[in-house]
Image (cartoon, helix red, strand yellow):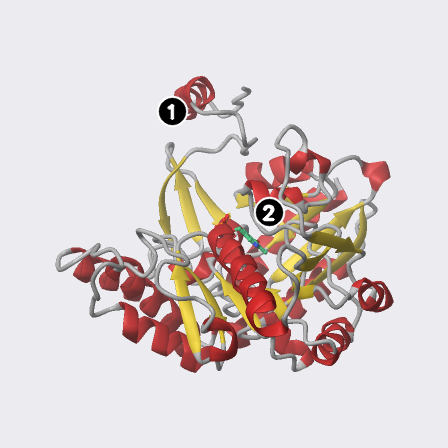
Amino acid sequence: MSDSSGGRTGPFLQEADRYSAHNYKPLPVVLDRGEGVWVWDVDGRRYLDMLAAYSALNQGHLHPTIINAAREQMERLTLTSRAFHNDQMGPFLRELCDAMGYEKALPMNTGAEAVETAIKLVRKWGYEVKGVPDGKAEIIVCDGNFHGRTTTIVGFSSEEEYREGFGPFTPGFRRVPYGDVEAFREAVSPNTVGFLMEPIQGEGGVVVPPEGYLRETREICSEHDVPFIADEIQTGLGRTGRLLCSQWEEVRPDVVLLGKALGGGVYPVSAVLADDEYMQVFRPGDHGSTFGGNPLGAAVGRAALQVVLDEDLSGRAAELGNWLMDELRGMKSPHVDHVRGKGLMVGVVIRESSGPARPFCEALRDRGILAKETHRQVIRFAPPLVVEKSTLEEALPDIAAVLSA
Ligand SMILES: *Cc1c(COP(=O)(O)O)cnc(C)c1O
């Protein structure tokens, strides 16, 4: 591990290197404090957080509303299990259903658990309601997808790196090219019980599908009685300039998956939203989670949602995102192939001839900006949605310098 910075960073890097499984390759920066869009390292250097924990920090670090809700709840009741009721889960799910326009919600913890829940939900719906023969249910997914890291989920990934060495995998998935309406239409069969998709592929490299893709695949789903499942774990809760990214094409998914920012940067909270038609297939004993719906997570989720709505984070993302993308395009960097995204989910695609995106992220780090490469060639800029325009304006010269070096 290299540490050019001296100071206290080195020993932390060595310790993590020694004791942590090497399943990540983090930038060599060790953080010990955060507030809003800022984080500080153990030597007191300040950085602008342009990753926001992969959009789990839409509300920023230590948002007072969320921290207060967590603190109050922590001093009252934190965990009941679902063997008993608690006074936070019901209000949380009601507020979530009201905001998103669904009849029911099922609370889990991580994003991957929400995805697994949706897979179980639509499979059971397929057998009980659609009449698919037992064991024949098929879910269509997209090339380049990222839905989490469980064995079932990596089993239908198109990334060799995510899959290799982890088989055998769960059957019942069929992959189609992302953004290709006709390929999807051809893949639908009488046994299709779901189309699981991301409205923008985040980990896939901030890949925005062609205009109309969501609407047209949604229509095909309706024609063939196939539930349209939008994984909005990264795109949801304001990130792309709408509460849900699906709303850009006025699409109402049958099943919506939320996570990441639903936990307000504090606590893992995820949820599956759907109407009764689907949700009624779950009966006592079918599915569960020890921590899902716990009062601490529910209180945090309520505050996290409230901040997204009260501070109009969607509106901020829409306005700042368009402006930021224009500024980045205006830099006319010789290394940049193109800039893409929606709202404050922005990908800067580095030309193959300029090498991978990683050294650009390291150079940004040296200038006090934390961003992370995704998919080798893409720098993702996705700051907390509470970011001020002036803060981004101040960062632009540093970004320009790094992109033109
Ligand atoms: C992050 C992510 C997940 C997985 O969430 P975890 O909380 O890491 O399990 C699933 N889907 C999408 C689109 C994501 O970005």
Instruction: Classify 10 Å Cα crowding around label 2: few (below 14), some (14-19), many (20 and above).
Output: many
Q: Nearer the viewer, residue 330 or 297?
A: 297
The residue pinned by badge 2 equals: 153
Instruction: Classify 10 Å Cα crowding around label 1: few (below 14), some (14-19), many (20 and above).
Output: some
- The residue under the point 76% across, 53% down is 175
The residue pinned by badge 1 equals: 8
Q: Nearer the viewer, residue 136 or 271?
A: 136
Establish whether ligand 1 lies closer than 8 Å to the Cβ of label 2: yes
**Residue 106: x, y in percent?**
41, 66
Q: Is 36 situated above or below 21?
A: below
Do we see residue 116 in this rendering? Answer: yes
Q: SS for tag 1?
A: loop
**Residue 369: x, y in percent?**
55, 45
Relative to 138, 15 lies left or right:
left
Mark 1 to mark 2 CA distance (whole Å): 39 Å
Kind of residue sitting beneath label 2: Ile
Who comes first in sequence, dot 1 or dot 2?
1
Relative to 12, 164 lies left or right:
right
